[in-house]
Amino acid sequence: MSPSPEFLEALYRAMLRGIGPTGWWPAETLYEIMVGAVLTQNTAWGNVDRSLAALRDAGMLEPHAIAVADRERLQDLIRPSGFHRNKSKALIALSQWYVDRCDADPQTVADVSDGDLRRELLGLFGVGGETADDLVLYVFSRRAFVADTYARRLFAFLGWEAPLGYPKFHDAVTPAVFATRLDVAELKEFHGLIDEFGKTCRDDDAKSKSFLGDWRWRLKAPNA
């Protein structure tokens, strides 16, 4: 059983009231978001911050710089984020695509459909479904839903179908998300709210004691 668009809109409003705006994604530039989306794979954000600071201090937090970066130097700079060999390779591939395909400007691919853009990103080394959706939403400002672990746990807690694995969960919930009236800015905030809630309430007991515990059943029937 999948959530309805009305349920998702009610959930978004409840979380916004309960948590307040998160301002996610924290970054000074769109390219910094791209780098952060790669670095945050399988690591805590504090480690990503350290890597971003090292890149910034080295004058490397710029697409043209990373596109031609020495692999070993890049690995050293991003080492705090872990998996530095694969992540350095992914950053170079993504940066080369961003420079060559987009001229380092998201607006140059404005005529590319959302689906085609996502498929292009998925074709790059080290870019999986979650990273692609992060980029589509936060860098290219297209409607997308980041179906990450925090989202899957929240949906399961609320009693909805939440298949294991990113692709299956993404495919199960995205049609309902796209049927909502939530715009790009709200979908960005929705992702931030879900992740903030998941970091604070790590298990079902904590979720039940939170503000969403009271909303758990009413969310299924917002007009009840």
Image: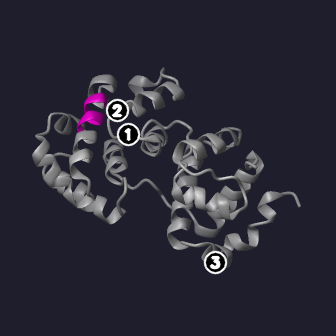
Q: Quadrant of the C terminus?
A: bottom right
Colour pattern: one colour
Q: Which mark is residue 124?
A: 2
Q: Secondary structure at mark 3?
A: helix
Q: Main secondary structure of the magenta part?
A: helix
**Disc 2 residue type (three-letter):** Leu
Q: Secondary structure at mark 2?
A: loop
Residue 183 falls in which quadrant of the image? top right
Q: Is residue 130 left or right of residue 34?
A: right
Q: CA distance from mark 3 to mark 2?
A: 39 Å
Q: Where residue 142 sits: x, y (%)?
A: 52, 36
| As drawn, 52 above or below 47 | above
Give the residue displayed 36% in from the left and 62% down from the top: 45
Earlier sequence position, callout 1 versus callout 3 = 1
Q: Is residue 219 left or right of residue 197?
A: right
Residue 100 falls in which quadrant of the image? top left
Give the residue displayed 54% in from the left and 66% down from the top: 198
Q: CA distance from mark 1 to mark 3?
A: 34 Å
Q: Which residue is mark 3?
A: 205
Q: Which residue is mark 1?
A: 127
Q: Which residues are magenta?
A: 92-97
Q: Are marks 2 and 1 in contact (CB under 8 Å)?
A: yes
Q: Is residue 110 left or right of residue 70?
A: right
**Disc 3 residue type (three-letter):** Asp
